[in-house]
Image (cartoon, helix red, strand yellow):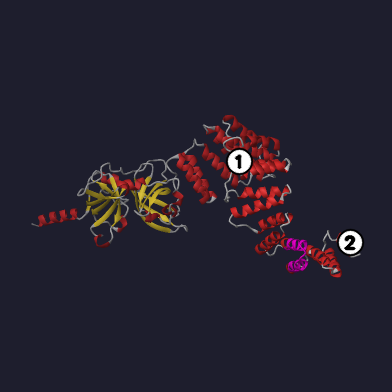
Amino acid sequence: MKKKIVIALFLSLLCQGAIMAQPKWVEKAKRAVFSVITYDKDDKMLNSGNGFFVTEDGVALSDYTLFKGAKRAIIVNYEGEQMPVEAIMGADDMYDVVKFRVAITGKNVPALALAQTPPAVGADVCLLPYSTQKSRTYTAGKVKAIDKVTDNYSYYTLTLKLADKRVSCPLVTMEGEVFALAQKASGQDTATICYGVDANYVMAQKITALSYSDAALKDIGIKKALPDTEEEALVFLFMASSQLPADKYMTVLQDFINQYPDSPDGYMRRANQRILMSKDENSLDRVSDDLDKALEVAQQKDDVYYGRAKLISAFVIENPDRIYADWSLDKAVAEIREAIKVRPLPIYTQTEGDILFAKGDYPAALEAYDEVNHSELVSPATFYTTAKIKEAMKAPSEEVLALLDSCVVRFSKPYTQEAAPYLFARAQAYMVANKPRQAVLDYDAYYDAVKGNVNDVFYYYREQAALKSRQYQRALDDMESAIALNPKDLTYRAELAVVNIRVGRNEEAVKVLQEALAIDASYAEAYRLMGIAQIQMKQKDAACASFAKAKELGDPNVDALIEKHCK
């Protein structure tokens, strides 16, 4: 009778998910399970939990909560050996899962095989706990229900008791293949029920080109793995460049080079980052090494020559007093011409023109840009640069204006902000050509294009055009607007006084100049202009006193006025 009771108790424990000691594969499979410890930004322990390997080269799965807020993490394997978590490979905070890679040293790690055939409802399953002891114990249970989640993955409900410290341990079939990641139940069923999220769903998590905008991944401070394809990895690099500090971005670049050693893009991007960080000749040597390596591995070498030309020319232009090896604008020209030999693309010809322009070889730059302006690359920007080359050559103003006309004509009315820079440039060219009325029209068009979002300098420029056009009220209004935006600028107040004197508003001019002197009593020009206004008002003595004060303060332009009016 006593023997029957013991057998019955044993069977009862089996049904309730008791700890079991069979089959033989358990001991080996449990070696894939490990403990995870995460640390915060102050390197204090943040969380601890479980995870397990799913590939022999160190890919592993665990729960996202364990890693949230972590700056680094380690795993402790069945032998008690510590290994650092190298990179996050994907995460989903909604299902509380994370995939990551552990930095392994030299040898493969024990890993669980993913279940080829997932268990059905009613199937016997087991949970493998983390342990540093040789043991074949596990927790038994059954599949109670299966729900389908996104992309037809499964979410399991199991009749299996899950201790707090066994969350994220692997749930395996009776053949020893992992099918899910254990998750704790909530509510009243915690003693007999737990859940499992499909291991294949966790494996499907990955880093994409746009992962730097993923909120869940942002909340993990551990380095992210690169996407699986070179194309996506390049976009990922671009996103990382604007969101990571220089040292961490360099780490990502090194990861890219390690993963794609035959891609010239990695070396070119690292060269560009290194030159931004360079402080001495040794650092520039490393830039040069990257440029040479990029050319060595490139299948299509013209793009590398193009990148080399741009990097070298930018360095020379931005660092006129810094000399490195044979880097010069002549070398940059030679590099871009090598690119043109391989493939005569308009963008290469435009770059050649830009370098020649910087070099001061204006005829050759003009020839290059004339070719660009007859290609599919023609744009307002290319005509604008051609106009600047013509200006540098001191070409007639009509030729410069014709090129700026070619810029503006490529935009439709009403003009948008895209056209605004060219309208402003043409307005200034009209002023150089002594066509102030046309300049006023372009300044007005610019104002409308930017929806009135202008600064004090704009009002000063437009006032100059209005004054030369004898549009005096407009000139007065624009100077008032400039002063309203920048009330401390004395030049604006002097200009407003000049316009007032021009139209005979001498008393108003004196008032404006007194306001200027209240800001700076040593502003000599204000006294000279005040003297001119006082002469107009027949106040000779006051005018001569103002001229004398201007001379005392060092105004070089007042002597002729004193000679004319005060002798």
Residue projecting furthest to the right: 567
Query: Is 6 situated above or below 543?
Result: above
Label 2 or label 1, whichever comes before in sequence order: 1
Q: Residues within 10 Å of mark 1 (few under 14, many from 20)?
A: some
The residue wearing badge 2 is 564
> How many numbered tags mark residues here?
2
Tell me the amino acid under the disc marked 1. Answer: Leu
Q: Quadrant of residue 555?
A: bottom right
Between 285 and 368, the residue placed more toward the observer is: 368
Residue 492 horizontal side relative to residue 172, left or right: right
Q: Dot 2: what SS?
A: helix
Tell me the amino acid under the disc marked 2. Answer: Lys
The residue wearing badge 1 is 311
Give the magenta-colored segment's residue range: 493-517
Q: Position of residue 172 (x, y in %)?
A: 27, 47
Q: Residues within 10 Å of mark 2 (few under 14, many from 20)?
A: few
Query: Is 456 situated above or below 538?
Result: above
Q: Measure the alpha-carbon separation of dots 2 and 1.
A: 60 Å
Residue 352 horizontal side relative to residue 49, left or right: right
Between 252 and 384, the residue placed more toward the observer is: 384
Q: Is any part of residue 328 visible from this angle?
A: no
Seen at 66% across and 52% down, the residue is 441
Q: Dot 1: what SS?
A: helix
Between 192 and 117, the residue placed more toward the observer is: 117
Q: Position of residue 367 (x, y in %)?
A: 67, 34
Q: Position of residue 300 (x, y in %)?
A: 53, 32
